Image (tube, grey):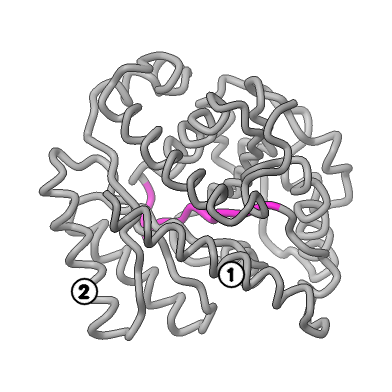
Amino acid sequence: MADQASRLREQMSQWIQAQQLHRDAPPEGDEAHAGVLSAPVFAVMSGKGGVGKSNLCVNLALAFAEDEMRVLVIDADTGFADVEILFDSTPLLTLCDVVAGASMEEALLATRPHVDLLAGGSGRCFDGIGEDGWARLLRAIARVSARYAWVLVDCAPGVHALAERMLKFGATPICVVTPEPTAITDGYALLKWMHVKNLGAEPWLVVNRAKSKAEADDTASRLVDAAERFLKMRVVYAGWIRDDPAVVKSVMARRPLLQLSPGSPAASNYRQLARWIRACGQTFGGDAGAKGAAR
Protein backbone atom coordinates (compact mmCIF):
# COMPACT_ATOMS: atom_id res chain seq x y z
CA MET A 1 0.00 0.00 0.00
CA ALA A 2 2.80 2.44 0.87
CA ASP A 3 4.53 1.68 -2.43
CA GLN A 4 1.35 2.37 -4.40
CA ALA A 5 0.75 5.61 -2.48
CA SER A 6 4.31 6.67 -3.35
CA ARG A 7 3.64 5.98 -7.01
CA LEU A 8 0.42 8.01 -6.91
CA ARG A 9 2.27 10.95 -5.38
CA GLU A 10 4.88 10.69 -8.13
CA GLN A 11 2.15 10.65 -10.76
CA MET A 12 0.53 13.75 -9.25
CA SER A 13 3.90 15.53 -9.27
CA GLN A 14 4.19 14.75 -12.97
CA TRP A 15 0.67 16.12 -13.52
CA ILE A 16 1.61 19.42 -11.88
CA GLN A 17 4.77 19.65 -13.98
CA ALA A 18 2.79 18.91 -17.14
CA GLN A 19 0.33 21.68 -16.31
CA GLN A 20 3.19 24.13 -15.85
CA LEU A 21 4.60 23.13 -19.23
CA HIS A 22 1.14 23.63 -20.71
CA ARG A 23 1.07 27.17 -19.33
CA ASP A 24 4.55 27.98 -20.66
CA ALA A 25 4.35 26.23 -24.03
CA PRO A 26 3.43 28.15 -27.21
CA PRO A 27 -0.11 27.55 -28.55
CA GLU A 28 -0.58 24.59 -30.88
CA GLY A 29 -3.76 23.17 -32.40
CA ASP A 30 -7.34 23.47 -31.12
CA GLU A 31 -6.23 22.78 -27.53
CA ALA A 32 -4.35 26.10 -27.63
CA HIS A 33 -7.60 28.03 -27.28
CA ALA A 34 -9.01 25.90 -24.49
CA GLY A 35 -7.32 27.53 -21.50
CA VAL A 36 -5.54 25.78 -18.64
CA LEU A 37 -7.01 23.21 -16.30
CA SER A 38 -7.23 24.34 -12.68
CA ALA A 39 -7.87 20.89 -11.19
CA PRO A 40 -6.62 17.37 -11.89
CA VAL A 41 -8.68 15.72 -14.62
CA PHE A 42 -8.91 11.94 -14.89
CA ALA A 43 -10.04 10.28 -18.11
CA VAL A 44 -11.57 6.98 -17.01
CA MET A 45 -11.09 4.62 -19.95
CA SER A 46 -11.33 0.96 -20.94
CA GLY A 47 -10.56 -1.20 -23.93
CA LYS A 48 -14.07 -2.69 -23.90
CA GLY A 49 -17.47 -1.91 -22.49
CA GLY A 50 -18.99 -3.43 -19.37
CA VAL A 51 -15.94 -3.28 -17.11
CA GLY A 52 -17.39 -0.76 -14.64
CA LYS A 53 -16.08 2.65 -15.73
CA SER A 54 -19.27 4.49 -14.91
CA ASN A 55 -19.60 2.93 -11.46
CA LEU A 56 -15.99 3.87 -10.79
CA CYS A 57 -16.61 7.51 -11.76
CA VAL A 58 -19.80 7.83 -9.72
CA ASN A 59 -18.56 6.15 -6.56
CA LEU A 60 -15.12 7.73 -6.65
CA ALA A 61 -16.86 11.11 -6.90
CA LEU A 62 -19.02 10.30 -3.89
CA ALA A 63 -15.98 9.13 -1.94
CA PHE A 64 -14.40 12.54 -2.50
CA ALA A 65 -17.69 14.24 -1.63
CA GLU A 66 -17.79 12.47 1.75
CA ASP A 67 -14.76 14.61 2.59
CA GLU A 68 -16.60 17.72 1.31
CA MET A 69 -14.50 17.97 -1.84
CA ARG A 70 -16.25 19.28 -4.93
CA VAL A 71 -16.20 16.96 -7.92
CA LEU A 72 -17.33 17.32 -11.51
CA VAL A 73 -18.29 14.13 -13.37
CA ILE A 74 -18.43 14.39 -17.16
CA ASP A 75 -20.25 11.62 -18.98
CA ALA A 76 -18.37 11.48 -22.27
CA ASP A 77 -19.82 8.09 -23.18
CA THR A 78 -22.51 9.98 -25.03
CA GLY A 79 -25.72 8.38 -26.13
CA PHE A 80 -25.96 5.82 -23.33
CA ALA A 81 -26.68 7.96 -20.23
CA ASP A 82 -25.16 5.47 -17.79
CA VAL A 83 -23.95 8.08 -15.30
CA GLU A 84 -27.24 9.96 -15.12
CA ILE A 85 -29.05 6.63 -14.61
CA LEU A 86 -26.72 5.72 -11.74
CA PHE A 87 -27.43 9.14 -10.21
CA ASP A 88 -31.16 8.79 -11.06
CA SER A 89 -31.01 12.25 -12.61
CA THR A 90 -32.80 13.88 -15.55
CA PRO A 91 -30.66 16.56 -17.20
CA LEU A 92 -32.06 19.25 -19.46
CA LEU A 93 -28.78 19.92 -21.27
CA THR A 94 -25.92 17.56 -22.11
CA LEU A 95 -22.33 17.52 -23.27
CA CYS A 96 -23.57 17.51 -26.86
CA ASP A 97 -25.45 20.77 -26.19
CA VAL A 98 -22.28 22.33 -24.80
CA VAL A 99 -20.39 21.29 -27.95
CA ALA A 100 -23.15 22.93 -29.98
CA GLY A 101 -22.84 26.20 -28.03
CA ALA A 102 -24.95 25.87 -24.89
CA SER A 103 -23.63 27.32 -21.63
CA MET A 104 -21.56 24.85 -19.62
CA GLU A 105 -22.74 26.47 -16.40
CA GLU A 106 -26.39 25.95 -17.36
CA ALA A 107 -25.72 22.34 -18.38
CA LEU A 108 -24.22 21.31 -15.04
CA LEU A 109 -26.57 19.31 -12.84
CA ALA A 110 -26.16 19.08 -9.06
CA THR A 111 -26.73 15.37 -8.48
CA ARG A 112 -25.56 15.09 -4.88
CA PRO A 113 -23.97 17.49 -2.35
CA HIS A 114 -20.56 18.46 -3.73
CA VAL A 115 -21.04 16.43 -6.95
CA ASP A 116 -22.03 18.02 -10.27
CA LEU A 117 -22.67 16.22 -13.55
CA LEU A 118 -22.32 17.13 -17.19
CA ALA A 119 -24.52 14.40 -18.66
CA GLY A 120 -23.92 12.55 -21.89
CA GLY A 121 -27.59 12.17 -22.74
CA SER A 122 -29.52 9.19 -24.01
CA GLY A 123 -29.43 8.59 -27.77
CA ARG A 124 -27.46 11.77 -28.44
CA CYS A 125 -25.12 11.82 -31.42
CA PHE A 126 -21.49 12.82 -30.85
CA ASP A 127 -20.12 12.27 -34.36
CA GLY A 128 -18.78 14.81 -36.79
CA ILE A 129 -17.59 17.42 -34.29
CA GLY A 130 -15.61 20.22 -35.91
CA GLU A 131 -12.58 21.95 -34.44
CA ASP A 132 -14.75 24.80 -33.15
CA GLY A 133 -16.87 22.33 -31.21
CA TRP A 134 -13.86 20.61 -29.68
CA ALA A 135 -12.30 23.92 -28.68
CA ARG A 136 -15.61 25.08 -27.20
CA LEU A 137 -15.91 21.95 -25.06
CA LEU A 138 -12.31 22.02 -23.82
CA ARG A 139 -12.55 25.72 -23.07
CA ALA A 140 -15.71 25.16 -21.03
CA ILE A 141 -14.10 22.31 -19.05
CA ALA A 142 -11.04 24.45 -18.32
CA ARG A 143 -13.21 27.38 -17.24
CA VAL A 144 -15.32 25.47 -14.71
CA SER A 145 -12.45 23.28 -13.46
CA ALA A 146 -11.45 26.05 -11.04
CA ARG A 147 -14.59 25.29 -9.03
CA TYR A 148 -13.66 21.69 -8.33
CA ALA A 149 -11.11 19.61 -6.51
CA TRP A 150 -11.31 16.83 -9.11
CA VAL A 151 -12.79 16.28 -12.58
CA LEU A 152 -13.69 12.73 -13.62
CA VAL A 153 -14.44 12.04 -17.29
CA ASP A 154 -16.25 8.78 -18.10
CA CYS A 155 -14.95 8.08 -21.61
CA ALA A 156 -16.54 5.75 -24.13
CA PRO A 157 -14.87 2.33 -24.35
CA GLY A 158 -12.16 1.86 -26.91
CA VAL A 159 -10.29 4.65 -28.70
CA HIS A 160 -11.90 7.85 -29.89
CA ALA A 161 -11.24 11.53 -30.55
CA LEU A 162 -12.52 12.88 -27.23
CA ALA A 163 -10.23 10.64 -25.18
CA GLU A 164 -7.26 11.62 -27.34
CA ARG A 165 -7.99 15.31 -26.91
CA MET A 166 -8.50 14.99 -23.15
CA LEU A 167 -5.13 13.27 -22.76
CA LYS A 168 -3.40 15.91 -24.89
CA PHE A 169 -5.13 18.52 -22.74
CA GLY A 170 -3.50 17.16 -19.58
CA ALA A 171 -5.89 14.50 -18.27
CA THR A 172 -4.45 11.47 -16.51
CA PRO A 173 -5.83 8.20 -17.95
CA ILE A 174 -7.31 5.69 -15.52
CA CYS A 175 -7.57 2.41 -17.41
CA VAL A 176 -10.18 0.04 -15.99
CA VAL A 177 -9.94 -3.69 -16.64
CA THR A 178 -11.39 -6.86 -15.15
CA PRO A 179 -9.67 -10.27 -14.79
CA GLU A 180 -11.57 -11.51 -17.85
CA PRO A 181 -9.22 -12.41 -20.74
CA THR A 182 -11.06 -10.18 -23.22
CA ALA A 183 -10.86 -7.21 -20.86
CA ILE A 184 -7.12 -7.76 -20.35
CA THR A 185 -6.48 -8.08 -24.09
CA ASP A 186 -8.52 -4.99 -24.91
CA GLY A 187 -6.90 -3.12 -22.01
CA TYR A 188 -3.49 -3.82 -23.49
CA ALA A 189 -4.75 -2.64 -26.89
CA LEU A 190 -5.79 0.63 -25.24
CA LEU A 191 -2.33 1.07 -23.73
CA LYS A 192 -0.77 0.32 -27.12
CA TRP A 193 -2.96 3.00 -28.70
CA MET A 194 -1.71 5.57 -26.17
CA HIS A 195 1.86 4.52 -26.95
CA VAL A 196 1.42 4.69 -30.74
CA LYS A 197 -0.27 8.08 -30.45
CA ASN A 198 2.63 9.26 -28.27
CA LEU A 199 0.22 10.93 -25.86
CA GLY A 200 2.89 11.11 -23.16
CA ALA A 201 0.64 10.10 -20.27
CA GLU A 202 1.52 7.44 -17.71
CA PRO A 203 -1.71 5.52 -17.26
CA TRP A 204 -3.09 4.42 -13.93
CA LEU A 205 -4.54 0.92 -13.84
CA VAL A 206 -7.55 -0.13 -11.78
CA VAL A 207 -8.61 -3.77 -11.72
CA ASN A 208 -12.36 -4.01 -11.20
CA ARG A 209 -14.56 -6.95 -10.20
CA ALA A 210 -11.71 -9.04 -8.83
CA LYS A 211 -12.62 -11.90 -6.50
CA SER A 212 -9.53 -11.34 -4.37
CA LYS A 213 -6.53 -9.08 -4.05
CA ALA A 214 -4.37 -11.88 -5.38
CA GLU A 215 -6.46 -12.11 -8.55
CA ALA A 216 -6.35 -8.33 -8.96
CA ASP A 217 -2.59 -8.21 -8.41
CA ASP A 218 -2.02 -10.98 -10.93
CA THR A 219 -4.17 -9.20 -13.53
CA ALA A 220 -2.36 -5.92 -12.98
CA SER A 221 1.05 -7.58 -13.09
CA ARG A 222 0.32 -9.12 -16.48
CA LEU A 223 -0.61 -5.75 -17.99
CA VAL A 224 2.10 -3.74 -16.27
CA ASP A 225 4.79 -6.23 -17.30
CA ALA A 226 3.52 -6.48 -20.89
CA ALA A 227 3.43 -2.69 -21.26
CA GLU A 228 6.96 -2.37 -19.90
CA ARG A 229 8.36 -5.23 -21.96
CA PHE A 230 6.75 -4.61 -25.34
CA LEU A 231 5.85 -0.91 -25.26
CA LYS A 232 8.58 0.42 -22.95
CA MET A 233 5.69 2.10 -21.16
CA ARG A 234 5.28 2.53 -17.41
CA VAL A 235 1.82 1.80 -16.06
CA VAL A 236 0.97 2.60 -12.43
CA TYR A 237 -1.15 0.00 -10.64
CA ALA A 238 -3.40 2.29 -8.63
CA GLY A 239 -5.72 -0.20 -6.97
CA TRP A 240 -8.54 -2.70 -7.26
CA ILE A 241 -12.28 -3.04 -6.63
CA ARG A 242 -13.72 -6.28 -5.28
CA ASP A 243 -16.40 -8.19 -7.21
CA ASP A 244 -19.33 -7.29 -4.98
CA PRO A 245 -23.01 -8.26 -5.56
CA ALA A 246 -23.97 -5.00 -3.85
CA VAL A 247 -22.81 -3.16 -6.99
CA VAL A 248 -25.46 -4.90 -9.10
CA LYS A 249 -28.09 -4.10 -6.49
CA SER A 250 -27.10 -0.45 -6.53
CA VAL A 251 -27.42 -0.26 -10.33
CA MET A 252 -30.87 -1.86 -10.21
CA ALA A 253 -31.92 0.58 -7.49
CA ARG A 254 -30.44 3.55 -9.43
CA ARG A 255 -28.53 4.55 -6.30
CA PRO A 256 -24.73 4.73 -6.14
CA LEU A 257 -23.09 1.99 -4.12
CA LEU A 258 -21.64 4.37 -1.53
CA GLN A 259 -25.17 5.48 -0.69
CA LEU A 260 -27.06 2.21 -0.97
CA SER A 261 -24.43 -0.05 0.68
CA PRO A 262 -21.84 2.25 2.28
CA GLY A 263 -20.32 -0.60 4.29
CA SER A 264 -19.88 -3.03 1.40
CA PRO A 265 -16.41 -4.32 0.41
CA ALA A 266 -16.44 -2.52 -2.95
CA ALA A 267 -17.42 0.75 -1.25
CA SER A 268 -14.37 0.37 0.97
CA ASN A 269 -12.17 -0.09 -2.11
CA TYR A 270 -13.57 3.06 -3.74
CA ARG A 271 -12.85 5.06 -0.59
CA GLN A 272 -9.33 3.66 -0.39
CA LEU A 273 -8.60 4.77 -3.96
CA ALA A 274 -10.01 8.22 -3.19
CA ARG A 275 -7.79 8.52 -0.11
CA TRP A 276 -4.68 7.71 -2.14
CA ILE A 277 -5.55 10.33 -4.74
CA ARG A 278 -6.38 12.93 -2.11
CA ALA A 279 -3.06 12.27 -0.34
CA CYS A 280 -1.30 13.14 -3.59
CA GLY A 281 -2.99 16.53 -3.72
CA GLN A 282 -2.11 17.33 -0.11
CA THR A 283 1.50 16.29 -0.65
CA PHE A 284 2.03 19.10 -3.13
CA GLY A 285 0.74 21.95 -1.06
CA GLY A 286 -2.80 21.98 -2.33
CA ASP A 287 -2.02 22.84 -5.95
CA ALA A 288 -3.89 19.72 -6.96
CA GLY A 289 -7.17 18.73 -5.43
CA ALA A 290 -7.39 21.59 -2.96
CA LYS A 291 -9.56 24.11 -4.76
CA GLY A 292 -13.32 24.04 -4.33
CA ALA A 293 -13.12 21.70 -1.37
CA ALA A 294 -16.60 22.64 -0.16
CA ARG A 295 -19.61 24.45 -1.49
Q: Is residue 103 left or right of residue 242?
A: right
Residue span colored magenta: 39-49
**In the image, residue 47 lies at what x, y percent?**
37, 61
The residue drawn where x is 64% and y is 41% is 120
Which quarter of the figure has residue 222?
A: bottom left
Answer above or below: position of 123 versus 112. below
Q: Is residue 162 left or right of residue 2?
A: right
Q: Is residue 68 left or right of residue 188?
A: right
The residue drawn where x is 43% and y is 35% is 55
Of helix, strand and loop, which one carries label 1? Answer: helix
**In the image, residue 73 lies at what x, y percent?**
62, 40
The residue drawn where x is 83% and y is 43% is 104
List the residue tagged with mark 2: 225
Quarter of the picture holding the C terminus: top right
Q: Nearer the viewer, residue 194 or 262?
A: 262
Residue 149 marker: none
Answer above or below: position of 114 versus 263. below
List the residue tagged with mark 1: 164
**In the image, residue 145 lies at what x, y percent?**
74, 48
Which quarter of the figure has residue 72?
A: top right
Give, as a three-letter code, the residue at label 2: Asp
Answer above or below: position of 99 versus 252. below
The residue drawn where x is 32% and y is 26% is 247
Q: Is residue 184 left or right of residue 253?
A: left
Which quarter of the figure has residue 109?
A: top right
Q: Nearer the viewer, mark 1 or mark 2?
A: 2
Of helix, strand and loop, which one carries label 2? Answer: helix
